[in-house]
Image (spheres, grey):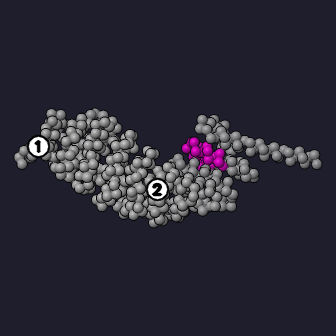
Amino acid sequence: MTANRGVSQAFTEYQAARLRFVQTISDLSSRSHNIEGLEKAGVLDLLEPLLFDVLPSIQQTAIATLGKLTNHEEKLAYTVVKRDIVPKLLENFNKQNKFYKKSTLYLFRTISKHSEDLANFVVDVGGISAIFDSLGDLDFRVKENAVWAVGYIARHSEDLALKIVTAGVVPLLVLCLQEPDHNLKHLSASALYDISKHTPELAQAVVDNDAIIILAKLLMNEEVKLKRQVLLTLGSIAKHSTNLAESVVEADIFPSCLLLMGHPDDAVRKNAAILTREISKHTLELAQLVANAGGIAALIEFISTTFKSSTKLPGIMALGYIAGHSDQIAIAIIGSQGVVLLSKLLMQEIDDSTQAIIVWALGQLGKHSPEHAQAVAVTNIFPKFIQLYMDPKSSQDLKTKIISSFKNILPKCSAVDALEPLLGDSPPEILSDILQHLSESISN
């Protein structure tokens, strides 16, 4: 009897020691500065047997710990792959409990996030099948980790996103969009973004599963993080083609999208401007629709009240696209002080990429007629064009856009007094165009 008690106690202590060890390693793995030391101590050799421990709590903690380790280090993720651990974890996956599934799906995510090769490995060993089954799981946390893994795989490439679509995952993501939990909605919208961003065909697969109408309704959700993602996802669909942009518009996203450009959160405002840009760029009809919905006033207000250059950039681009499609819409923008605003911004702006977009937008506004060109010329912005062109720090993209905008505006420009001051400072490649235009104007 005493001997049996001793045996039992020994095994109990061994079990407690294993659990204590794996919990300690799990805690240490949560902090990146510990990873190198754990790796040097041979943590994978010690952890691997515990991945298949007879005690579920030890096994599940070990899998989650492996996920934490691979989350920090791509090198460790490759090491785990070479050890052939993942295929073993997938054996009888569907028969495992929710804690095992959650930990394993977390490991998929942390391996997949680093590179296309690692994500392909997870797919090729049967990871998509496990993810597919988990998307229909009754447990919220299992479902959440499955959705997260989808996004981390799909984001890398068109090929991986296509494998996700072919596996039938998109309809399940759309169902997850309709779950009550905000985080699951956000992750699902993010995964749909990671799929749709690559090609028109992949975006169409999202549209064909009725995602747009659900995404559009979520624009009115109070959760800020969700608003940000939904706007990005709708923009990633609309960007590809006129038909896809029209599909987004048909979900009645206006005027909600325009109103969100006035949201207190910078990221929401920026993403609303991105969506407006992606719709406006395609056709006159879509640009007119945005303008009719109040888009001009909303964009000008957004640009004028936004501090960060990177945030206001999509709004400036949207204004340029809208102006470029139609002389009448461009006149409406001019009448709303759009040219004055952009010229003022260019005088103040120091970011090269933003300067380039402002120059381009002014070219789109001034290209239509003498009236349009005059509106640009009277802001006295042409000397700034020359100054930026001559600046050795200016990028080639900015210089190219300055040349292009001059070529757009000059043929329509009758404001000789705005051009004459440029004769002394302009470089030859711009001066020749100015001289040619002035000579034509005088002869006429």
Question: Which residue is under mark 1?
Answer: 438
Identify which residue, 114 or 48, lies in the foreground: 114
Which residue type carries mark 2?
Leu
Assess whether residue 386 is covered by the magenta stretch. no
- The image position of residue 300, as x and y in percent, is 32, 47
Q: Is residue 280 above or below residue 403?
A: below
Residue at the image position 58 percent from the left and 45 percent from the top: 71
Q: Is residue 420 above or below residue 263?
A: above
- The image position of residue 58, as x and y in percent, is 72, 48
- Asked if residue 408 can be seen in this view, the reply is no
| First to last magenta residue range | 63-84
Q: What numbered label is drawn on residue 219?
A: 2
Q: What secondary structure predominates along the stretch shown in magenta?
A: helix
- The image position of residue 159, as x and y in percent, is 47, 57
Reading the chain from its start, which is encountered first: label 2 or label 1?
2
Q: Secondary structure at mark 2?
A: loop
Residue at the image position 40 percent from the left and 54 percent from the top: 257
Assess whether residue 83 is covered by the magenta stretch. yes
Q: CA distance from mark 2 to mark 1?
A: 52 Å
Which residue type carries mark 1?
Leu
Give neighbour class at mark 1: few <14, some 14-19, many 20+ (Cα, 10 Å): many
- Asked if residue 368 can be seen in this view, the reply is yes
Q: Nearer the viewer, mark 2 or mark 1?
A: 2
